[in-house]
Amino acid sequence: MRIGIYGGNVRRGKPLSSLVDEIVEKEQEGFSSYWTPQVGTFDALTMLALAGQATSSIELGTAVVPSYPRHPSALAQQAATVNALCGGRLVLGVGPSHAPGIEALGLAYDRPARHMREYVTVLKALGAEGRVDFQGDMYQVRTGFACPDARPFTVVVSALAPLMLRAAGEVADGTVTWMVGKNTIAANTAPRITAAAANANRDAPRVIVGLPVCVHDDKAQATARAVQIFQGYGQLPNYRRQLDAEGIDQAGEIAVVGNEDDVTAELEAYFEAGATEVIASVYPAGNDSRGSFARTNALLKSLAAAG
């Protein structure tokens, strides 16, 4: 199994630089990748640039950078810089985010599938050639840059709906999901994006599946904790549709929970459904948070080592 860590949390009382220490630790433990979201805390790409200087092999990903607030030319230049500093290990995850958050910035959440198709087209051209001349419906971009040590960077899209999956398969390198169950991966995500990539004569896309994971003997307790932590996701329409398709009421019920055998079997099922990688958002359950984190991490570490 290809197992990564979906982290990005700075523990209370710890400095921001402790995140770099965590990424170094995850590389030493054998995880294939480390991912951080772009949310209302630190700048994700800046932190990955620092981590790139302190590591040598682990992939470094964003899941995801919201696209509407950042012009694709500006993001491409930043991503090219980060990719150069981490030796080509950046996986740039981008996505339209959600209407409430984008509109709160005074921006229009307009035609997200068309927006992402054009946005990624500009990103990929700039990442590959350092220049672009693109005239689309939503973007008209003629520009370029010359970043030292630049090389093409991987771009994946937080694609959920059919039009977005088609765009991701045709112009990006894959998708990174969150709050998507294995049945939906098997019936919708993996076949749609794979078919789109094949029809566009592109390489097989990456299907990177982000999941909350907790190794705990009491499944009910672990699930209840996940429901508490992740309840807000069920209120966002993009995620709500995916949860409904999976037959899930509360967002936290998507979590992979149980003892070591249970969690291993569940993760294997995601790979059988079409995932090419799972990135685990580890959360604790029970009275011993530190012990809970350690137990889950130990299992994931063993699975990552086994390949």
Image: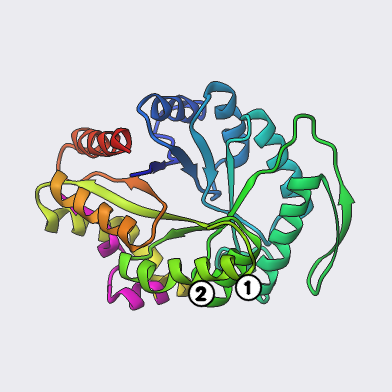
| Residue 2 colored in magenta in the image | no
Nearer-the-camera pick, 269 or 231: 269
Does the residue at mark 2 contact the one at mark 1 (Cβ under 8 Å)? Answer: yes
Q: Is residue 20 found left or right of 240 in the rendered image?
A: right
The quadrant holding residue 156 is: bottom right
Q: Residue at x 37, y 30 (%)?
A: 30
Separation of marks 2 and 1 at Cα, in angstroms: 9 Å
Give percent across and percent down for residue 151: 72, 38
**Which sits earlier in the primary sequence, circle 2 or circle 1?**
1
Q: Residues within 10 Å of mark 1 (few under 14, many from 20)?
A: many
Give percent across and percent down for residue 116: 66, 66
Q: Is residue 215 visible?
A: yes
Q: What label sits on residue 113 in the rendered view? A: 1
Query: Which amino acid is tagged 1?
Result: Ala
Which quadrant is the C terminus positioned in? top left
The quadrant holding residue 290 is: top left
Q: What label sits on residue 161 in the rendered view? A: 2
Query: Which amino acid is tagged 2?
Result: Ala
Nearer-the-camera pick, 156 or 173: 173
Q: What label sits on residue 55 in the rendered view? A: none
The magenta segment is 241-258
Q: Residue at x 49, y 72 (%)?
A: 192
- Label total for image: 2
| Residue 257 colored in magenta in the image | yes
**Under tag 1, what secondary structure?**
helix
Q: Is residue 107 visible?
A: no
Q: Residues within 10 Å of mark 2 (few under 14, many from 20)?
A: some
